[in-house]
Structure formats: C-alpha cells, structure tokens
Image: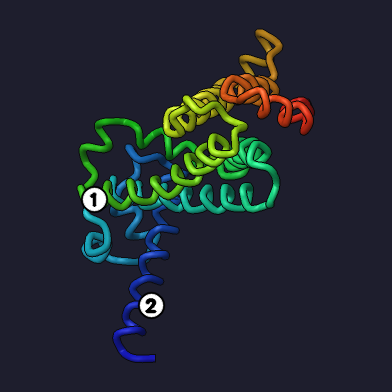
Amino acid sequence: MGIQERKGREKEQRRDEILTAAERVFWEKGLTVATMDEIAERAELGKSTLYLYYKSKEDLYLAVSMRGGQIMRRLFEEAIGTGEPTLKLIWNLGEAYYRFFREYREYFRMFYFMENAQVHSQVSPEMLETCAASDEKIWDLVFGLIRRGIEEGTMRPDLDPRQAGVMLWSNANGLMRQMDRAGKYWKETLGLDLEVTLRMSNRFLVLGMLTERGRRQWEEMNLGMEQ
C-alpha cells in the first residue's frame, strides 16, 4: 500500500469515527443543545481537527443523517431486487420505508428535523449539494419503478412519475410522523391503529394510479389486504 493510499484510508477512518461520535451526541442531546466541543471530546480529537472535516455543526448533522439515507437506499434496493412484478415492487418499497421507520427511528427523526429552514441556512453549499446528490439516487429508484409501471401498462399513462412518487412518500411520511409523535394518542382516543391506517391509505393511493389491467393484477396479488 502506498503512502497516499494509506493516508486516504486513515482519513476516511477518522471521518467515520467523527460521524459515530457525532451520531451519539446528536441522538442524546439533539442538534440545538449538542456542541462541537462535546463531539470533539467524544471522538477524542481537538475541535480544530473536527473543523478540518466539517465546516459547522449543521454540516456534521447532515452528514450523520446521510448515513440514514444510505441505509434506506440499501433497504429500497433489496425491496425492488426480488424479481417480482412491478406493482409488487412498488408495494415492497412502502414496506421497506416502514421498516426503516421502525428499525432506524433516530435517523428518521433526523430527516424531518433537517426540513427546518433555519438549519438549512447554516449548512454549507457543498454539503447541501452532496446531500441532494444522495437523495436523488433514492428518488431515482422510486421514480424509475413508477415509470416502469406506466410503460408496462399497469399504471396510468397520464401519471407524472415524480408527482406520483412524492404523493406516496408524503402520505407515508405524514402518517409515520404521527406514529412517532402521537401514536398512543390516536390509539387511546380514537381507537386508530396507524399502522393499519398507513397500509390502507397506501393501498387507496396506489389503486388510484392503476389502469384496469393494473387493478386486476393488484387484486390478484391481494396487496394491502393482509392486515
């Protein structure tokens, strides 16, 4: 191994150590209360070294959240790599997102905290660009699958894959946030199981996007009726 290659590997290892330390501090205290001093101490580094890797606390927060994005992308790729019919893969995507919500809750919470405009104003343009490129890879999986359904004739030809994808994401995201924040309230006051509600609403939305051929295929697979 050459000197440059070794230095590169050491730098990436240090970056990973910083992200792990920052992840723990952010999850314990949140972005507002956490400090770069605490993260540097947890990573056993000087704060000046920390700033060599990340320009601000907000940049570091976004970098940690991108770890979650990588996990979600992996789950999505597994969900659509089964060789099943396109409509089943679309359903699999929704189930994969819900799995991400259940198993990686802290990352999910980081995602919606990053929608705060004030936080974004503190993030460097370079980090925003990196994050946008990472998000685009995930969206490409979603849009590509819907586009395939349109081409196959199971999804309506007048659909815009981007609009359809955002509709499905917004529905699922909104309900999962309610589960996270107030799931017990909905269960105890109205007797609503939001997991059942999520699958039902996903099913209704997708059915509205299907052609007659797609509806027959969907019903044959009995998707969304297992609850």
Rendered view: 112 above or below 204: below
Residue beneath the point at 36% across and 65% down = 15
Marks 1/2 in contact by CB < 8 Å: the verdict is no
Label 1 environment density (alpha carbons within 10 Å; few <14, some 14–19, many ≥20): some
Can residue 101 be seen at all in this image of the molecule?
A: no
Residue 148 at x, y percent in the picture: 54, 41
SS at mark 1?
Answer: loop
Question: Extreme top residue here?
Answer: 190
Say which mark, if any, is on residue 9: 2
Tell me where residue 222 appears, x and y as whole percent. 78, 29
Q: Position of residue 170 (x, y in %)?
A: 48, 26
Pointer 1 residue: 56
| Point 42% across, 33% down: residue | 162
* Residue closest to the far bottom: 2
Q: Please state if 166 lies on the left or on the right of 148 as rendered.
A: left
Residue 13 appears in the picture as rendered: yes
Residue 187 picture quarter: top right
Q: Amino acid at mark 2?
A: Arg
Which residue is depicted at the point 54% across and 38% down?
A: 151
Q: Nearer the viewer, residue 192 or 131?
A: 131
Amino acid type at mark 1: Ser
The C terminus lies in which quarter of the figure?
top right
**How far is disc 1 from disc 2 in space, using C-alphas?**
23 Å
